[in-house]
Amino acid sequence: MNAVRAEWTKLCTTPGPAWLLLATAALTVALGAAISAAAAGPGVDAARVTLSGVYLGQAPVAVLAVLTVSGEYSTSLIRTTVTAIPNRPAMLSAKALVLAVAVAGAAGPAVGVSLLAAPHLSLADGPVLRAGVGTVAYLVLVALFGLGAAAVVRDSGGAVGVVLGLLYLPPLLASMVAEPRLHRLLERASPMSAGLAVQATTDLDRMPIGPWAGLGVLAAWSVAALAGGALLLRYRDI
């Protein structure tokens, strides 16, 4: 618990995290509303369109996650942190828990506002509720993915590039691939394309991957990044 309190204090006493979380909420709501207004019409998955602001809203989350680790390396604060908490995997776990709570606290209201403000959508509808809860879980998993990547790479710029590249580049590559099986594989394995399948509420049988299975793919990416980060943090010199 001491490690969790220490990490929470760090998060709350610096202005950067608050601004990044505010940017996540604002971008998610504003961009989603703009796209929803432009793309409204029959045959459109209204919930998925309404929540599409997360495509841009996830970027500040990734930056925050990276800075949670790499920011301490750039200022050498990591040495103080490791001295205070010698159990390095426990330290990373505390960072992950605090980060997950903070991101969920910002994403939850933003997603709720987006869905409640949309006409003809109700949180009492099971698929819509699943899309909303899944979107919050998606942003939390992106944060954990970024945290693990930062523990592996250490450098802020490099880690941000790796995380955003793995999120945004595979969908672009998939859009340029004409071969059906490779295209489907890219969509099923990409952390963003697979993870955001949880937002779909219509035509689920036509999707490359199911909603929860897609979120599971992103979870696998996040677990792998955290495991790699914890392993290197434990055995690599600070």
Image (cartoon, rainbow, N blue to C red):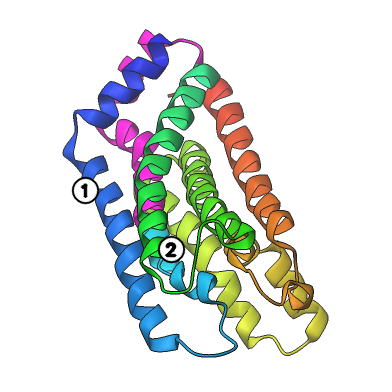
The secondary element bearing badge 2 is classed as helix
Residue 62 on the magenta span: yes
Residue at 46% x, 23% y: name it. Answer: 94
- The span shown in magenta is 60-87
Residue at 40% x, 14% y: name it. Answer: 3
Residue at 48% x, 51% y: name it. Answer: 139
Amino acid type at mark 1:
Trp
The secondary element bearing badge 1 is classed as helix
Q: Nearer the viewer, residue 147 or 49?
A: 49
Amino acid type at mark 2:
Leu
Q: Is residue 152 visible?
A: yes
Mark 1 sits on what residue?
A: 19
Image quarter of the C terminus: top left
Q: Is residue 76 visible?
A: no
- Please state if 231 lies on the left or on the right of 147 as rendered: right
Residue 146 locus on image (x, y percent): 47, 46
Q: Nearer the viewer, residue 212 or 99?
A: 212
- Please state if 138 lies on the left or on the right of 98 as rendered: right
Relative to 130, is 151 above or below?
above
Label 1 Cα crowd, 10 Å radius (few <14 / some 14-19 / many 20+)? few
Residue 158 locus on image (x, y percent): 42, 52
- Please state if 140 lies on the left or on the right of 184 as rendered: left
Residue 120 locus on image (x, y percent): 47, 73
